Amino acid sequence: RSDIQRPVFVRAFSTQPVIADPPSPGKIATTFEPWWSAEDIEAGIETGTVRYGKLHVPAFETGQASVELDADDDGRRVRVKVPGFMARNRAVHGDRVAVRLMWKAYKRDDSGSDGTGEDEVSVGRVEDARARVVAVVKRSEVPVVGVVRPGETKIQPRDQRLPAMDLVQPFSQVDEGVHLVACEIVEWDEASVNPKCKLVVITGRELELPGASKEC
């Protein structure tokens, strides 16, 4: 099995969630927040502020992502909005994730305090919450299909819900032209909007795929 099928909880184990350094005043954050540890996630589940679920990103409205939460004790499956690319925190469509539920506007902690803020302890109706991904528990098993040229490391996914990706090793196919390949995400640094992936299979020359020109 691929390594990405293993839980990918973060490195740190602390009594409070780890918060990334705040951006400079007047600047938009360009780094993702560190994923929470398994201990922090379990603590959040106990207080009702963290839930597990599956991320859904619409194919034609990629800014309207949501997470379908696991069924609660009454068997209800609620879908909660995940506002914006950074709130997905390196999760992609189909990933199983842990999310932090929030009922107030979110901002990064710039005080350096390790205490919980008011927005973390105020719990409302799940239907009224917004969510931020705090960990990717399991990557989607669907391979990423994209195009690449010989000698290059940049994969451009065919699925517009996915960002461009960097191959961990340059594409070594000797034939010239654009090739269609399938790959898996293996790493995604907090400071990068482009995940790293490894090649799984070379499907073939993009323009030579059977039926490719017949697609609507």
Image (cartoon, grey):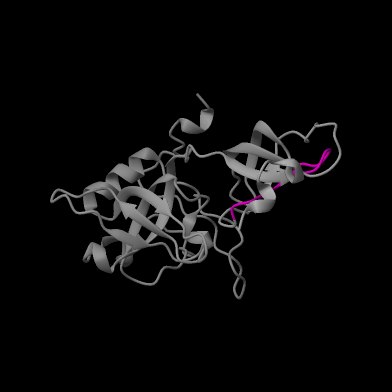
Q: How many marks?
A: 0
Look at the image and give the residue range highlighted in magenta. 148-159
Q: Is residue 214 above or below residue 109?
A: above
Which residue is located at x 40 percent, y 46 percent? 97
Quarter containing the C terminus: bottom right
Q: In front: 170, or 119?
A: 170
Residue at 77% in and 35% down: 171
Towards the viewer: 55 or 8: 55
Residue at figure coordinates x 24%, y 62% from the top left: 126
**Residue 109 lies in what quarter of the image?**
bottom left
Is residue 122 among the parts visible in the rendering? Answer: no
Q: In the picture provided, is 135 more to the left or to the right than 2?
A: left
Residue farthest toward the left in the current orientation of the protein: 74
Is 91 on the left or on the right of 149, as rendered?
Answer: left
Q: Give the image location of residue 76, x and y in percent.
A: 19, 54
Q: Is residue 21 visible?
A: yes
State the residue lying farthest toward the top: 1
Q: Residue 208 at what x, y percent from top left?
A: 75, 41
Q: Position of residue 181 (x, y in %)?
A: 68, 38
Of residues 7 and 207, the one nearer the viewer is 207
Left or right: 139, with 150 as reference point: left
In this rendered view, identify the residue nearer to me: 73 or 9. Answer: 73
Measured as percent of width and height from the top left, residue 156 is found at: 69, 50
Residue 152 part of the magenta-drawn span: yes
Q: Is residue 29 above or below residue 56?
A: below
